[in-house]
Image (cartoon, rainbow, N blue to C red):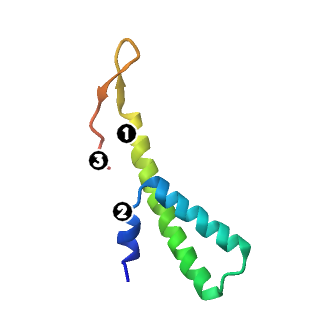
Amino acid sequence: MIDAANDIAGLSFEEALKQLETIVRELEQGNVPLERSIDMYERGDALRKHCDTLLKSAEAKVEKIQLGQNGEASGTEALDPQ
């Protein structure tokens, strides 16, 4: 069996979001056995956390883009470690 954390860590934002949307849709239909629902919920939570991490990273990069005098992007500034 593939380690779920490693599996999720390798997903792009779009891939993780698509999987999360599928899980939500299936759970909302209500015809998933309880044990499977719990597994799906746990995977969904891990996918949500992964998406949140990727989104925060992207936001930090966008915030660090430097603009030149003409308003064009002129480079980036190193991210501050937190």
Contact between marks 1 and 2 (CB within 8 A): the answer is no
* Quarter the N terminus occupies: bottom left
> Could you classify mark 2 by the number of other residues whose Cα lies within 10 Å: few (under 14), some (14-19), or many (20 or more)?
few
Determine whether the residue tagged by mark 3 lies in a helix, strand or loop. loop
Q: Which residue is mark 3?
A: 81
Nearer the camera: disc 3 or disc 2: 2
Q: Residue at x 49, y 65 (%)?
A: 47
Q: Which amino acid type is shown beneath numbered disc 3?
A: Pro
Instruction: Give percent across and percent down for residue 34.
Output: 64, 86
Q: Which residue is mark 2?
A: 10
Residue 41: quadrant of the picture: bottom right
Contact between marks 3 and 2 (CB within 8 A): the answer is no
Q: Is residue 34 above or below residue 75?
A: below
Q: Is residue 5 above or below residue 34?
A: above
Instruction: Give percent across and percent down for residue 49.
Output: 47, 62
> Residues under labels 3 and 2: Cα distance?
22 Å
Q: Nearer the viewer, residue 55 or 29?
A: 29
Residue 21: quadrant of the picture: bottom right
> Residues under labels 1 and 3: Cα distance?
12 Å
> Residues under labels 1 and 2: Cα distance?
20 Å
Q: Which amino acid type is shown beneath numbered disc 1?
A: Lys
Q: Which amino acid type is shown beneath numbered disc 2?
A: Gly
Q: Which residue is mark 1?
A: 61
Q: Which mark is residue 76?
A: none
Instruction: Give percent across and percent down for residue 22.
Output: 60, 66
Determine whether the residue tagged by mark 2 lies in a helix, strand or loop. loop
Determine whether the residue tagged by mark 1 lies in a helix, strand or loop. helix
Residue at the far top: name it: 70
Q: Residue at x 37, y 78 (%)?
A: 2
Label whose residue precedes the other's in the sequence (1 or 2):
2
Residue 73: quadrant of the picture: top left
Q: Residue at x 47, y 58 (%)?
A: 15
